[in-house]
Image: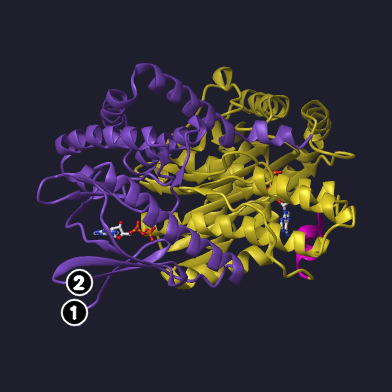
């Protein structure tokens, strides 16, 4: 079975082609929208995605060396994401599905991040720690669905470290040679400053850290501080990462699962991975990390999840395939894990 | 010296059962975590130990079912608590749904009283309630994240956490059990406050979860 998947939820137009046997991945084509400065402007991003769609699609087809007729189904991420961007992917997918007379499979973007992680790390039933730029969640499978055990009550972890870096002039770029600039800056620090540590049950809140850290920075540039920028970065990193580890720990204690899977861009942080490994010793759990290439948005994860779903009869009438900007992960049935 | 037996490794603490003056007790030791900065680690364990003892004390005085605190040593992050013989609520739900319904109603009442006393639990889950074997009374435990607050936001987070714990761990019983919980809560706090609180819960739930809002904040 061969499935073609389309990702276009925010800043990446990706087309992946996968099959249900090794080597699973036949093609992985992508184009990334990189904003000049600041964050993603949904409309600008969607225009970029639309302009790249044709090129990325034909790249994927030639890389996989399959004819359109050999494809069994078209999968598409219908959400969650930015409306204008989602509609680009949905339009391309509907068109392909109708034109090629191939079934269309709806895929939830967050579920796809998890499924590709499971495949590539050979995990069975982990507590999933999902740390993207716009998302921070602790998720685990229970009774037919991925359930949310914890999440951020305000901004995401990636958002915190990026915005902090930007405000104090460390970035962009936020990641240099695979290391986040805040992680890098923290290496020379070591003094723990007064920044709030906010865990509420299995939830976390990062906005207080950002406010406190920026206040400390103001004092620093006013020459009224007995600490350095390195100390601020150190404190932000220690507090924020420890909070995430603690809530993951709570989910492990609560569910009794034996694996932890880190997914999303921030999962690439070595400092964070070290903390998780140190925590894992207490519970005898195994820590796994999605390879960076597939931690970020891509079409392969959509294709792979589409394949799993299609094998269990999940399809959607192209006419009814509308985008769902707020499609929650725990609304999706996962028949392939039953 | 009575025998000391490790009965559980919780998320924060190791729990030992032993006897003091013939009474069964729990020693709760918040253990040091290697992954944390040393200063942060001490701060967290010290602070939570004191807070847990203090808040349990207040709630005992109000007659709520919480285990008595027999000893506190913040520097060592140790609490000695009355041992509650019973079943975790989490386990009871899968065994006896009718009894669970009654317990949720009672629990709602207790949380209502707690909130009237300006105390929020901070980690309300079905793992943090022990149903006492002798009389099926739900004992609320684990006050390490509790704090004093009259803020509707903080009280809303409590309700959100309870609801989410049902959704994630007991998806089939969310509606019936939460309804009972609210019945109990409303009987203490009144219709009007409970309605306002539920609106707050809705708002809290909208905040964190959706990619879109958070992505847009980057701009
Ligand atoms: N090596 C790294 N260490 C820490 N954070 C990283 C690293 N690489 C990427 N990130 C962070 O990951 C986030 C992007 O992750 P991604 O999964 O692409 O999220 P989104 O799709 O929501 O933007 C950014 O906040 C970025 O700074
Ligand atoms: N007073 C008590 N009586 C009986 N069992 C208890 C008591 N306190 C805790 N326990 C048991 O230990 C477990 C963990 O305790 P808890 O206080 O929640 O620690 P943690 O925060 O580390 O999880 C509880 O779920 C319960 O099974």
The part of the image, by quadrant, that contains residue A40 is top right
Question: Which chain is rendered purple in the image?
Answer: B
Q: Secondary structure at mark 2?
A: strand
Q: Nearer the viewer, residue B190 or A198?
A: B190
The location of residue B90, given as percent across then percent down, is: 27, 47
- Specify the subunit that label 1 lies on: B
The part of the image, by quadrant, that contains residue B29 is bottom left
Q: Is residue A206 left or right of residue B15?
A: right
Residue located 24% across and 42% down the image: B63
User: Callout 2 environment at 10 Å: few (<14), some (14 to 19), or many (20+)?
Assistant: few
Judge whether residue B72 is colored magenta. Answer: no
The part of the image, by quadrant, that contains residue A54 is top right
Residue located 55% across and 62% down the image: A121
For the residues labelled 1 and 2, say whether their Cβ atoms are less than 8 Å apart: yes
Q: Is residue A64 left or right of residue B158?
A: right
Q: Residue tagged by mark 1?
A: B2
Judge whether residue A177 is colored magenta. Answer: yes
Q: Is residue A264 left or right of residue A314?
A: right
Q: Residue tagged by mark 2?
A: B20
The reply to whether residue A227 is in sight is: yes
Q: What range is drawn magenta here?
A: A174-187
Name, please, the residue furthest toward the bottom. Answer: B1
């Amino acid at each position: 079975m061969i499935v073609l998947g389309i990702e276009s939820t925010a800043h990446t137009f990706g087309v992946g082609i996968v099959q249900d046997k090794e080597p699973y991945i036949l093609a992985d084509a992508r184009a990334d929208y990189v904003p000049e400065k600041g964050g993603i402007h949904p409309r600008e991003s969607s225009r970029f995605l639309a302009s790249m769609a044709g090129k990325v699609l034909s790249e994927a087809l030639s890389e996989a060396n399959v004819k359109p007729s050999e494809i069994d189904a078209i999968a598409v991420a219908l959400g969650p994401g930015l409306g204008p961007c989602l509609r680009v992917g949905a339009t391309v997918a509907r068109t392909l599905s109708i034109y090629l007379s191939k079934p269309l499979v709806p895929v939830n973007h967050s579920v796809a991040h998890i499924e590709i992680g499971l495949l590539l790390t050979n995990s069975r039933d982990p507590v999933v720690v999902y740390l993207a730029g716009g998302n921070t969640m602790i998720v685990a499978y229970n009774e037919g669905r991925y359930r949310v055990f914890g999440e951020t009550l305000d901004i995401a972890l990636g958002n915190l470290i990026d915005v902090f870096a930007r405000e104090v002039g460390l970035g962009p770029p936020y990641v240099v040679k695979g290391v986040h600039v805040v992680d890098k800056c923290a290496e020379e620090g070591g003094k723990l400053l007064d920044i709030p540590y906010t865990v509420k049950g299995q939830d976390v809140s990062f906005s207080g850290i950002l406010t406190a850290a920026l206040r400390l920075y103001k004092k620093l540039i006013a020459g009224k501080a007995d600490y350095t920028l390195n100390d601020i970065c150190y404190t932000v990193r220690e507090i924020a990462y420890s909070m995430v580890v603690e809530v993951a720990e709570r989910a492990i204690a609560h569910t009794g699962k034996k694996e932890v899977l880190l997914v999303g861009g921030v999962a690439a942080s070595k400092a964070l991975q070290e903390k998780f490994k140190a925590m894992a010793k207490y519970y005898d759990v195994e820590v796994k990390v999605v390879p960076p290439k597939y931690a970020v948005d891509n079409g392969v994860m959509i294709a792979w999840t589409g394949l799993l779903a299609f094998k269990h009869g999940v399809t959607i009438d192209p006419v009814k395939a509308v985008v769902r900007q707020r499609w929650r992960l725990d609304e999706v049935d996962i028949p392939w894990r039953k | 010296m009575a025998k000391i037996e490790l009965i559980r490794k919780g998320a924060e603490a190791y729990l030992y059962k032993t006897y003091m003056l013939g009474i069964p007790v729990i020693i709760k030791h918040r253990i040091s975590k290697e992954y944390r900065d040393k200063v942060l680690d001490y701060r967290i364990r010290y602070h939570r130990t004191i807070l847990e003892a203090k808040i349990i004390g207040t709630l005992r005085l109000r007659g709520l079912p919480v285990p008595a605190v027999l000893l506190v040593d913040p520097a060592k992050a140790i609490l000695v608590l009355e041992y509650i013989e019973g079943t975790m609520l989490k386990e009871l739900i899968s065994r006896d749904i009718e009894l669970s319904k009654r317990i949720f109603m009672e629990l709602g009442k207790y949380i209502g009283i707690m909130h009237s006393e300006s105390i929020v639990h901070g980690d309300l889950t079905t793992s943090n309630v022990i149903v006492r074997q002798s009389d099926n009374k739900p004992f609320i435990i684990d006050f390490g994240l509790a704090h004093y607050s009259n803020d509707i936001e903080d009280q809303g987070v409590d309700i959100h956490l309870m609801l989410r714990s049902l959704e994630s761990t007991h998806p089939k019983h969310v509606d019936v059990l939460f309804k009972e919980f609210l019945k109990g809560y409303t009987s203490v706090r009144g219709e009007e406050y409970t309605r306002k609180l539920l609106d707050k819960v809705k708002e809290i739930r909208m905040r964190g979860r959706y990619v879109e809002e958070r992505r847009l904040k980057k701009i």
